[in-house]
Image (cartoon, rainbow, N blue to C red):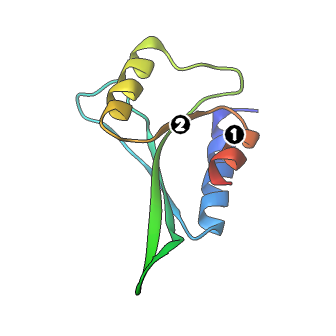
């Protein structure tokens, strides 16, 4: 299986859930994730008279099965996480399912 196969599966599953996947190009920033997964809002809790709905945005770095992020990618992922961003590295169809469950 190739990275492209995992990407195609991710896009198919996210769209089936009503979400979107964007391929991102970063100018002047090496190592940043190259996909943004956006899932539609869902009911989270009832805050008195107000229903709270939350969407989900996740930065995703896709890899071929068994491949790991390079050092510069890990560094950038940690910078993003320190700023409150969710960053996931996925190298399998099971990883896609775990993200979307």
Residue 95's label in the rendered image is: 1
Which quadrant of the structure image shows residue 84? top left
Q: Nearer the viewer, residue 91 or 46?
A: 46
Residue furthest out toward the top: 71
Q: Position of residue 23 (x, y in %)?
A: 44, 47
Q: Position of residue 27 (x, y in %)?
A: 24, 34
**Left/right of residue 2 with respect to residue 78 in the rendered view:** right
Q: Nearer the viewer, residue 77 or 64?
A: 77
Residue furthest out toward the bottom: 49
**Left/right of residue 45 with respect to residue 31 in the rendered view:** right
First-in-chain label (1 vs 2): 2
Disc 2 secondary structure class: strand
Give above or below for 74 relative to 4: above
Q: Quadrant of the N terminus?
A: top right
Which quadrant of the structure image shows residue 4? top right
Do the numbered discs 1 and 2 sit on residues whose CB atoms are within 8 Å? yes
Can see residue 55? yes
Tell me the residue at 51%/72% (across/down): 45
**Left/right of residue 84 with respect to residue 10 in the rendered view:** left
Tell me the residue at 64%/53% (across/down): 100
Residue 50's label in the rendered image is: none
Which quadrant of the structure image shows residue 26? top left
Q: Which residue is mark 2?
A: 88
Give above or below for 55 relative to 94: below
Tell me the residue at 46%/64% (across/down): 55
């Amino acid at each position: 299986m190739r990275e492209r196969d995992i990407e195609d599966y991710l896009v198919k599953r996210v769209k089936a859930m009503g979400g979107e996947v964007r391929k991102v190009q970063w100018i002047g920033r090496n190592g940043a994730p190259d996909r943004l997964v956006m899932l539609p809002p869902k009911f989270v809790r009832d805050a008195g008279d107000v229903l709270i709905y939350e969407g989900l945005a996740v930065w995703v770095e896709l890899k071929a099965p068994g491949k790991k992020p390079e050092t510069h990618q890990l560094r950038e992922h940690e910078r993003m996480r320190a700023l409150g961003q969710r960053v996931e590295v996925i190298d399998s169809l099971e990883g896609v399912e775990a993200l979307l469950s």
